[in-house]
Image (cartoon, helix red, strand yellow):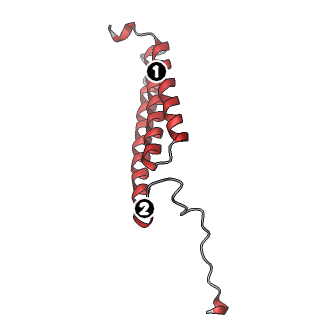
Amino acid sequence: MPIASVPLSWYLILGAALFWVGLYGLLASRALIRTLMSIALMLNAVVLNLVAFARFVEPARTAGKTFALIVYAIAAAQAALGLALLIAVRRPHSTVAVEGTDVLNRAPRVVDEGKR
């Protein structure tokens, strides 16, 4: 089946299914890596819809493809930042479970100068 014969609705249904699978993985997962993979899956669903609309609505314009490249750049930055966060959390806590880390929940300790 040539790609021209696949209707736009199939791409949109596939994009919506990928987005919902990613959203479910984001909400149901407790592992940091699985959460990052779910966000990447949601971004890929958005890119699929952008490229599908660009292909079917106005194939001569490159706006959809340009936005897709921008989303891929954002996804690459998100992956790099997520892996850096994973390494930063893994070292002191020796766990990558999201609920096992409370690094940002604690207030910094204030040392009272009078009691020193």
Q: Residues within 10 Å of mark 2 (few under 14, many from 20)?
A: few
Residue furthest out toward the right: 114
Left/right of residue 113 with respect to residue 71 in the rendered view: right
Residue 52: give x, y in percent of width and height: 45, 19
Give the residue at mark 2.
Answer: 88
Q: Position of residue 83 (x, y in %)?
A: 39, 52
Q: Residue at image x 46%, y 29%?
A: 45
- Given residues 2 and 54, the one toward you in this image is 2
C-alpha gap between disc 2 and disc 1: 35 Å
- Which quarter of the rendered picture does the C terminus lie within? bottom right
Quadrant of the drawing holding the N terminus: top left
Check the image and report above or below for 46 versus 38: above
Residue at screen point 43% across, 52% down: 81
Q: Is residue 14 above or below residue 24?
A: above
Residue pointed to by mark 1:
14
* Amino acid at circle 1: Leu
Residue 104: mark: none
Q: Residue at x 43, y 67 (%)?
A: 92
Q: What's the amino acid at mark 2?
A: Ala
Could you tell me residue 101's position as x and y percent?
A: 51, 60
